[in-house]
Image (cartoon, helix red, strand yellow):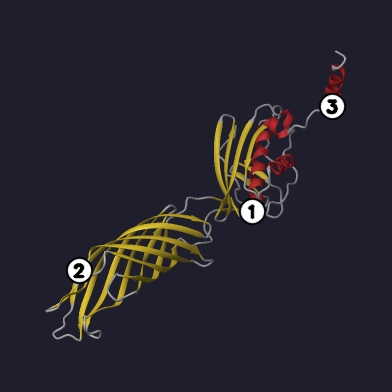
Amino acid sequence: MTSAIPWLLWSALAPAPATDPIATALELRWQAPAPCPDRSALTHAITALATVEPTVVRSRASIDARVEPHVDGFALQLRVEAEGRTRTRTLVAAKCSSLLDAVAIEAALLLEAAHAATPRATAIHGEVAIIAGTVRLARRPRPQLRLRGSASLGGAVIEGASAGYGGGVVVNGRRWGASLEAVHWPRGFAPLAARTSAGTTLRQTDVIASGCARHAHGRVGASLCIGAAIGARQAGGRGLVDGREAVAATFALVLAPAFEWQTPSPIVAAIAPWVRAAIVRPGVRVDGLGELARPRTWAFGGALRLEFSLWPPARGRGRRARRSAGGELRRTRGGFGDGFGGSATLTPEDDTP
């Protein structure tokens, strides 16, 4: 019995563990990568903005904020549950701190709305810290139209040729792509068995229609394309008696992965190795000698591509929400704005009680 007395005295006199005042009024979840501020920074920002004590709030709201890397900096997936309703928002900003400030402002308004004694305030009184950077409402990416030029190296497409060139158009979505391209192999030659200066000249032009699965992160991307190549092969005699031109149709399937890099300009550079499986592969014949050459079934090579973005423009589009370097940040019916007429940072639904 006496041994329990010191423990009881220590329990009564020991200071109570510190509690997070925000947690008593708001269920707050913040997930962000390492460069971003942590949850304690978010809690401090909310406390600085809120005009009510979190401990006296009667109803409890919920905010779930998840930050991920984005091509323009960082993307915020925001989910707010309050008064039996759920709202979701997606914001994109160059700096993660701008997204943290947007979450803090939303949380401060929720604390005021849920206050037991006072109605919802129409303004956040007092000065707030200046929020640097630009926040933009994220949009679903639109398909992009590009012009393509390419230089190809490979063997066994036509006899004696290892280089070709081409061009076409490309349409790329977020996870898909499609292209229509013409490739010309200009300098093939099939010599006679006994004479290297006489034989048959060869040229081939293919039109390749491809569909692609693609993925991009930042300025780099990768794709895997499968296409059908329909072509025409021209053969002509060199050093032969009564040589004549002949044209034959070809057909092949092409598998081509590609690795892309977006330059600071609207130009995209890509390296694309390819594998070609010939389905229709006409041979070259000389009267009296028989067949001189026939393409192989499998051909391998690669291409260097340069693509120019035509539409939409890479920069300068999309709605932007800017906040001025001064003035009082206040709540409006459409969201937040500054004292100098800035546009909305967050655009919630009409949640006026």
Front residue of 271 and 267: 271
Circle 1 packing at 10 Å, graded few (<14), some (14-19), many (20+), is: some
Give the number of the disc on residue 14.
Answer: 3
Q: Residue at x 26, y 67 (%)?
A: 296
Q: Residue at x 52, y 60 (%)?
A: 219
Mark nearest the camera among 1 and 2 is 2
Q: Which residue is most to the top?
A: 1
Indicate which disc, 1 or 2, sits on the residue closer to the N terminus. 1
Q: How far is mark 3 from mark 2, CA to CA?
A: 93 Å
Horizontally, residue 36 falls left or right of residue 69, namely: right
Q: Which residue is most to the left?
A: 288
Horizontally, residue 194 falls left or right of residue 142, namely: left
Helix, strand or loop for disc 1: loop
Indicate which disc, 1 or 3, sits on the residue closer to the N terminus. 3
Mark nearest the camera among 3 and 2 is 2
- Can residue 349 be seen in this snapshot? no
Horizontally, residue 250 falls left or right of residue 77, namely: left
The image shows residue 171 at horizontal and vertical percentages of 39, 59
Mark nearest the camera among 1 and 3 is 3
The quarter of the picture where the N terminus appears is top right
Compared with 290, 219 (above or below) is above
Helix, strand or loop for disc 2: loop
The image quadrant of residue 51 is top right
Q: How far is mark 1 from mark 3, CA to CA?
A: 43 Å
Helix, strand or loop for disc 3: loop
Q: Residue at x 22, y 75 (%)?
A: 234
Q: Amino acid at mark 2?
A: Pro
The image shows residue 244 at horizontal and vertical percentages of 16, 81
Q: Amino acid at mark 3?
A: Ala
- What residue would you read off at disc 1? 95
